[in-house]
Image: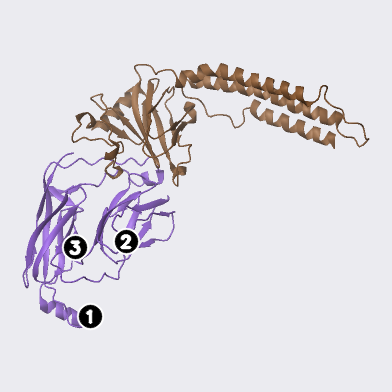
Chain colours: A purple, B brown
Amino acid sequence: MRTKQLSSLALVALAAATTGAVSGPAPIMAGSITGTVTFTGTPPKMRPIDMAKEPTCASQHPTPVMTENVVTGPGNSVEYAVVYISAGDAGASPAPSTPVRYDQKGCQYVPHVLAFQTGQQLEVYNDDQTSHNIHPLATVNPEWNKSQPPGAPPIQASYTKPEFIAVKCNIHPWMHGYFAVMGTAHFATTANDGKFTISDVPPGKYTVTVWHEKFGTASQEVTVGATGAATANFVYKALPY
Amino acid sequence: MGKLFGAIVAVIAVISAAIFVARIWWLPADVSVLGEGIDHQLTETMVASGVLFVAAQLALALFAWQYGDAGDARPIKIFPGGATPMVVIATALVGIEILVLSFVGTRIWGNIFLTPPDPSALTIDVQAEQFAYYFRYAGPDGKFGTVHPELIDEGSSNFFGLDPAHDTAARDDIISASLVVPVNRPILLRLHSKDMGHSFFVPELRLQQDFVPGLVIPIHFTATDTVKKEIVCTQLCGLGHFNMRAYLEVKTEPEFEDWLKQQSQ
């Protein structure tokens, strides 16, 4: 995730000048949006996943792993929520050249929710001693599914349109995750403490949206000042069923 | 040449029969109440067809040995009355054999597929899908929640399509990926398929039944030993068919009750 946080224009200019990472006029990247995603109410109980039919995976989990549809942390925090700028971004940002990594490990998807940009390279690894068949259920982007035996090279893919894509394995029905394909460079996924930081946000007025696979979406307006950090906290209302 | 052929046929027939008589590559040990009847029926069938098989092969060998072309230009002899009565007699004999075996076997077939299970049977729902089995127990309230196929969501472990938000009976239903049953207690399985034809096969229970999407197919058994055995799919159901399996775990009654309690927590 983006943890780098630059606090002033001078720093940005200095960094650009010393590393040569930015060519041409340095973009104004001053602020950041931070916040916490929490819930009120009672969230659904997660269930243990029984992997008995796949002994090579079951043996990797001394205690059964739980489903990850709603993962909460201390202080009613919500993990795996994707927070992003949904309006107000000036122009499209080019996708980073570094690929993102998605692992099939112990018959689970790691991380459960993977956020990346449109056009960014996605690499899917099979770390298990069994075959997987990854099937992202895209509806806006082209849908595909690919088999990957143990030891096979990573599957390469990318998406051109923003979409939240549920991912399943056609061999192991309990495997479940999400791709959050972002049309912006300004996004973050919450950690177990529910916190997120969207960095390198130029000053301006934005709509910030949070997405969670069970709790849905919510938005709020945020203004980022010339030097400061803006805050956007989200509270979901959770129901047990 | 006829003598060589006769000798080879006789040797093959005797070795084939010996493999069955000596029970090399025989069935795995039976652990079900109905298994004994099935094994008995199977043995009867094997003996009946085996005796005929050996007799027919030895007769063939004898005739090849005795009457094979010796290169002495003997005229070919015709079976008395020509081929027609021979074919009619053979067909009738084989037909009668099959009818008798079917008739004798009907009782054991009926015991499994046409007789309702004991009323005290423990009911377990089975959901087959590409490429796993899931088993549902009614939970502490003894009631199964209603199934809504449109609510099936594997990612949330809702393999049966339950609606706990509106259906209180569904809230305590226990879902397991292994079929855990108490020993010596009749079990009624209700087979559902989410997507296509699958099969429930446990050789040790002598039980094999297809799943058909849209049908709820009941089968029942009583396990007689505390064992852990594999349940395998024997209908080719797609890419992961090779990997479609689950485990049958037969526990003692107290162990089973403990397991149920653990699951409902």
Where's residue A55, x and y in %?
40, 43
Q: Say if mark 3 contacts mark 2, CB within 8 Å.
A: no
Disc 2 is attached to a residue of which chain?
A: A
Q: Is residue B160 visible?
A: yes
Q: Could you tell me the amino acid type at mark 3? A: Phe
Sequence-earlier tag: 1 or 2: 1
Give the quadrant of residue B144. Answer: top left
Res A187 label: 3
Q: How many marks?
A: 3
- Circle 2 residue: A101
Where's residue A81, x and y in %?
19, 54
User: Residue at left 13%, top 77%?
Assistant: A11
Where's residue B124, x and y in %?
34, 27
Q: Give a yes or no on whether discs 3 and 2 share a subunit.
A: yes
User: Residue at left 22%, top 32%?
Assistant: B171
Q: CA distance from mark 1 to mark 2?
A: 26 Å
Sequence-earlier tag: 1 or 3: 1
Q: Residues within 10 Å of mark 2 (few under 14, many from 20)?
A: some
Helix, strand or loop at disc 3? strand
Q: Could you tell me the amino acid type at mark 2? A: Arg
- Circle 1 residue: A19
Q: Residues within 10 Å of mark 3 (few under 14, many from 20)?
A: many
Q: CA distance from mark 1 to mark 3?
A: 24 Å
- Nearest the viewer among B124 and B230 is B124
